[in-house]
Image: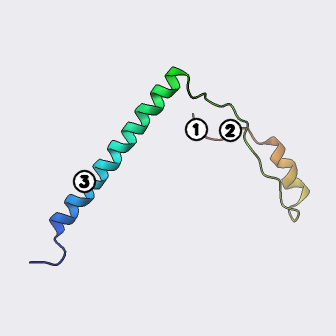
Amino acid sequence: MKILNTNMLLTVLIGAMVLVSAMQTLQLVSLTSALSSGRVAVGTGAAVVSAPLASSSASAAGSLQNLPSMVGGC
């Protein structure tokens, strides 16, 4: 008999992953129903751009103004 049974360890890990997946599914369903019923509003907040450090050059500060408001995504 091994101290650490590999089959038991894999069974426990797969069970934990299934449990986490089920919890995420329930959260997604509740969020979807909350959005469809209007209890939660989707925000349209603006992106926050942090101020450049005092040691950065002026050209770097000027280039921050040319950045798009959203990078990546859909």
> What amino acid type should be assigned to the residue bearing mark 2?
Met
Location of residue 43 in the rendering, given as x and y in whole percent from the top left corner: 65, 31
Which kind of residue does numbered mark 3 sit on? Gly
List the single residue furthest toward the left.
Answer: 1
Other-residue count near label 1 (Cα within 10 Å), few / some / many at <14 / 14–19 / ≥20: few
Mark 2 vs 3, N-terminal side? 3
Discs 2, 3 touching: Cβ within 8 Å: no
Could you tell me if the residues under marks 1 and 2 are in contact, i.e. CB atoms within 8 Å?
Answer: yes
Q: Measuring from the top left, give residue 73's x and y in whole percent.
A: 58, 38
In the image, which disc is placed on residue 15?
3
Residue 65 in the image: above or below residue 32: below
Q: According to the image, label 1 marks what residue?
A: 73
Q: Residue at x 61, y 29 (%)?
A: 42
Residue under pointer 2? 70
The foreground one among 14 and 67 is 14
Going by the numbered disc 1, the residue's amino acid type is Gly
